[in-house]
Structures are given as structure tokens and as C-alpha cells.
Amino acid sequence: MIASRDMSSFFATQIANAKKHFERALDCKHTEFDDLYPYMNEHPQFFWYKRYVAWQELLTVVRLAGELEVEWKQWFTAAQVQYIECKVLEARVLDHWYQDDKQKLEEEVGADE
């Protein structure tokens, strides 16, 4: 049987990897998906499909963590948790995924003035 700490550590790694993969897809950066389907780069739909695949991976890891009662919300902002809980990859997720991060950065920069 896997110890609770080992399970939490495993899922922390999996969540971090899935989040990184989704964010790289969101930013149109290279992911493992590009290596699997290099010929797809020519197609305009490729980036949407790539984001969808990364989103599904993130949702799957989060769902499994939740079912095993492993805390996952700590890795995300409050807005990101809402997007994940809604499960639908829509334009507002793509447009506002980094919103809280940008807002915090703007507040920190504004505080220096």
C-alpha cells in the first residue's frame, strides 16, 4: 500500500506537470504533443486541439487527486480552481488563466511607485 505522504507527493508532481503542460500549450510553446504530431503544426486547428488535450490531462489528474482525497487546490489561484471545477475549456479560461498572477504583479509594481 502506498503511504499517504507518497501519494500526496506523487500527485503534487503530476499536478505540477499537468499545469505546466497546459500553460505551455496555452502560451503556444513546445510540448510533448508537438513531438507526437509534428505534421499537425501546419494546421490552424492544431493549437486549439493541443490546448484541449492539455486541459483534459489537467482535469484528469485533478479528478484523480480529488477522488483520492489529495489536496490539489493549493497549486492554483482561486479563479483557476473555478475554471477547473467548471471543467469547460472556454474562451474566458484561455483569456484569464493568468489574470490573478498579472493582477498581483501590477499591484507589486504599483506599490514600488
Image (cartoon, helix red, strand yellow):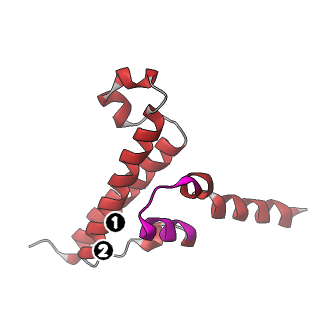
Q: Circles 2 and 1: CB distance less than 8 Å?
A: yes
Q: Quadrant of the N terminus?
A: bottom left
**39 vs 5, nearest the viewer:** 39
Q: Which quadrant of the figure has residue 88?
A: bottom left
Mark identifier at residue 74: none
x, y percent for residue 99: 65, 60
Q: Amino acid at mark 1?
A: Val
Left or right, 12 with reference to 108: left
Residue 62: image tag: 1
Residue 40 horizontal/vertical position (percent): 38, 25
Q: What residue is drawn where x is 46% and y is 55%?
A: 89
Name the residue rendered at 46%, 72% in the picture. Answer: 74
Q: Hey, what amino acid is under mark 2?
A: Gly
Of residue 60 and residue 7, the one placed in the foreground of this image is 60
Q: Residue furthest right?
A: 113
Q: Quadrant of residue 103?
A: bottom right
Q: What is the secondary structure assignment of the residue under circle 1?
A: helix
Mark 1, other Cα within 10 Å: few <14 / some 14–19 / many ≥20 = many
Mark 2 → mark 1, Cα distance in angstroms: 6 Å
Magenta segment includes 80: yes
Which residue occupies 41% across, 39% down? 50
What segment carries the magenta color?
79-91
Residue 8: image location, x then y, percent: 29, 71
Please count the marks in the image. Answer: 2
For the C terminus, the image quarter is: bottom right
Tag shown at residue 66: 2
How would you classify the magenta stretch by its main secondary structure?
A: helix
Pick the front one: 62 or 43: 43
Q: Would you say residue 101 sits in the magenta stretch?
A: no
